[in-house]
Image: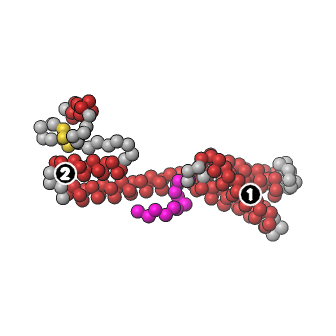
Amino acid sequence: MDSRATLFDPPSRGGPVRDACRVAALLAATTAVGLLLDRYASLTSVAMLYVLAVAVASYAVRLPASIACALGAVALLNFFFIPPHFSFRVDAQENVATLLALLCVAVVISQLGTAMRRQAQAARLNAKRALQLEQLATELAGATFPAEILLLCQRFLSRAFAGPCLAGLLRADRGLDLPADTPAAMREGLQAAAD
């Protein structure tokens, strides 16, 4: 399986502070580009820069930070680019519609990006599990003794899941073959469940 990161990977560890720093840097960069292009671009073009920033944030940070990015994008667009500049007052009705549309689109993009990343993560996990099961089936096909089957199952379970794992084989007489180091209380509980 490819170990390189993609846009659909979960955000790296670091928590809300790192997410806030990423959002702040993204919004600052977008605002700087918007200010450079302000003389040459329309308000709609600058608004699209902020939509792009929110789309990037939806892949780079968790949902709360992505929503904060959407709100910040609307506030920054209003403050720096909508007349009267350097104020949160909006004089023209069309600009109110622009801000509301930007907010709606940005929130939807945030949620869709987060959902897409979650689905991609689940798909990668499912592909990994399918590969593990295929490998187990291949090795089990060559196993001939119950102890060998038990050992293979135990090894694959331990690789696939965090924490203690236990494999057992149910015999034809409803008895349970378990590893020798299984605690007696657990052995009795499992045997009772098998009956």
x%, y% of residue 119?
Answer: 48, 53
Magenta region: 1-11
Between 128 and 120, the one nearer to me in the picture = 128
- The N terminus sits in image quarter: bottom left
Q: Quadrant of residue 165?
A: top left
Q: Is residue 108 left or right of residue 157?
A: right
In three-dimensional space, the C-alpha distance between marks 2 and 1, rounded to whole angstroms, equals: 60 Å
Callout 1 crowding tier (Cα within 10 Å): few <14, some 14–19, many ≥20: some
Residue corresponding to mark 1: 28
- Residue in the picture at 25% in, 56% down: 137
Residue type highlighted by circle 2: Glu
Say if residue 189 shows up in the picture. Answer: no
- Residue in the picture at 70% in, 53% down: 24
Q: Residue furthest left?
A: 173
> Mark 2 or mark 1, which is nearer to you?
2
Give the number of the disc on residue 127. none
x%, y% of residue 25?
Answer: 70, 57
Residue corresponding to mark 2: 148
Q: Residue furthest front?
A: 181
- The C terminus sits in image quarter: top left
Q: Quadrant of residue 57?
A: bottom right
In the rendered image, the vertical position of residue 121 relative to residue 39, given as above or below: above
Instruction: Confirm whether the magenta stretch covers residue 175.
Output: no
- Which circle's residue, 2 or 1, is located before the other in the chain? 1
